[in-house]
């Protein structure tokens, strides 16, 4: 039984991770801010409250003494505005650096981190789609330093689009579910871009495997992809959503242009060893649709 520290514990992925590892019998400490909305956070988790300072995080890590950390905290914007600069840098770089430093001081060197396939625009080895993706890459570079200099064993899981029941994020699928319920028309791009969706439960299984990997691997910073088995055009994805909810969605295809730096073909790198998605897209969409009835 591990003592696991989870950042981003009130977010969609973080909440699911906390619940899954509690169910598996682990002791879980959820890092939260004083003003965090913890109403959906599993109450079996210990709340590790930090004010965002280096000293505060160091103290809660010292007191909790984790065996490993799952770093799910992030600040996402597909297209940033000036007001996003400080919170994005603080959440995606500064906080992670504070975390590594605090973990180092209690001898905890096992970390599972999340990246994004948006770090690979046009399938380049590294070409960030957005500032968000650039900050995720920058944090991976910090992980390389801590692994090389301080003996950390870090696994980064680069995710495609994630989804699942209870997702209230400002993401495509929750928005499509709202449109399905209202029947309102939705202007969209021509819809030829490919999309790849991975169910949150499959992400959790990937985290479990990655966590076991950090327990046996030598120090280093490894990167793997966690993606669904199906990569399909956005038009086809929306049609599948319609079938899941039992009615076609009112989409105005081509009413909007493609976004600047639209990802037309998601990058898929080396898959996490010993892992494969178990939930098909159609099954996952039915699960989500059932929660919106």
Image (cartoon, grey):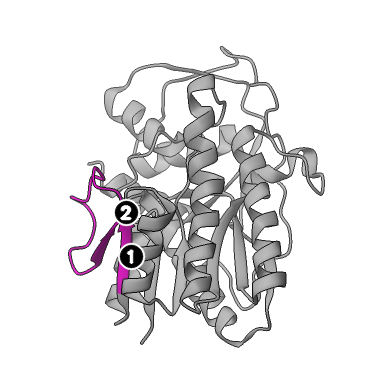
Residue 43 lies, in percent from the top left, at: 17, 64
* Most foreground residue, 199 or 170: 170
Q: Quadrant of residue 247?
A: top left
Mark 2 or 1, nearer chain start: 2
> What is the residue that sits farthest to the front in this orientation?
55
Q: Looking at the image, can residue 253 be seen?
A: yes
* Most foreground residue, 253 or 62: 62
Residue 242 lies, in percent from the top left, at: 41, 36
In the image, which disc is placed on residue 50? 2
Q: Is 1 rendered above or below residue 239? A: below
| Residue drawn at the location 58% of the way across and 79% of the way down | 214
Instruction: Say which quadrant the C terminus sits in.
Output: top left
The magenta region covers: 28-50
Q: Secondary structure at mark 1?
A: helix
In the rendered image, residue 256 lying in the magenta stretch gets the answer no
In the image, which disc is placed on residue 166? none
Q: Is 12 rendered above or below residue 65? A: above
| Residue drawn at the location 61% of the way across and 47% of the way down | 136
Predominant secondary structure, magenta span = loop
Q: Quadrant of residue 150?
A: bottom right
In the rendered image, residue 48 lying in the magenta stretch gets the answer yes
* Most foreground residue, 44 or 244: 44
> What is the residue that sits farthest to the right in this orientation?
124
Is 101 situated left or right of 155 in this image?
Answer: left
Q: Looking at the image, can residue 7 be seen?
A: no
* Most foreground residue, 102 or 128: 102
Categorize mark 1 by other alpha carbons within 10 Å: few (<14), some (14-19), many (20+).
some
Which residue is the site of mark 1?
60
| Residue drawn at the location 47% of the way across and 40% of the way down | 75
Real-space CA distance between mark 2 and mark 1, rounded to the nearest whole angstrom: 7 Å
Residue 38 lies, in percent from the top left, at: 22, 51
C-beta proximity under 8 Å, tags 2 and 1 = yes
């Amino acid at each position: 039984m591990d003592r696991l520290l989870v950042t981003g514990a009130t977010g969609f992925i973080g909440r699911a991770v906390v619940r899954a590892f509690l169910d598996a019998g682990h002791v879980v400490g959820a890092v939260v801010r004083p003003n965090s909305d913890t109403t959906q956070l599993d109450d079996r988790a210990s709340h590790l409250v930090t004010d965002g300072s280096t000293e505060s995080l160091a103290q809660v890590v010292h007191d909790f003494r984790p065996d490993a950390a799952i770093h799910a905290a992030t600040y996402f914007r597909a297209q940033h505005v000036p007001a996003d600069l400080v919170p994005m840098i603080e959440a995606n770089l500064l906080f992670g650096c504070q975390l590594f430093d605090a973990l180092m001081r209690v001898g905890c060197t096992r970390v599972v981190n999340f990246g994004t396939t948006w770090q690979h625009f046009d399938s380049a080895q590294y070409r960030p789609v957005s500032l968000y993706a650039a900050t995720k890459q920058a944090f991976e570079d910090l992980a390389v330093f801590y692994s090389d200099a301080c003996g950390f064993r870090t696994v980064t899981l680069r995710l495609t689009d994630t989804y699942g029941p209870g997702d209230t994020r400002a993401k495509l699928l929750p928005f499509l579910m709202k449109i399905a319920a209202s029947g309102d028309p939705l202007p969209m791009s021509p819809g030829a871009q490919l999309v790849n969706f991975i169910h949150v439960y499959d992400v959790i299984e990937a985290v479990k495997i990655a966590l076991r990997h950090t327990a046996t691997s030598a120090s280093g910073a490894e990167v793997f992809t966690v993606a669904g088995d199906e990569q399909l055009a956005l038009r086809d994805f929306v049609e599948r959503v319609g079938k899941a909810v039992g009615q076609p969605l009112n989409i105005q295809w081509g009413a909007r242009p493609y976004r600047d730096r639209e990802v037309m073909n998601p990058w898929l790198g080396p898959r996490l060893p010993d892992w494969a998605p178990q939930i098909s897209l159609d099954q996952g969409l039915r699960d989500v649709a059932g929660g919106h009835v």
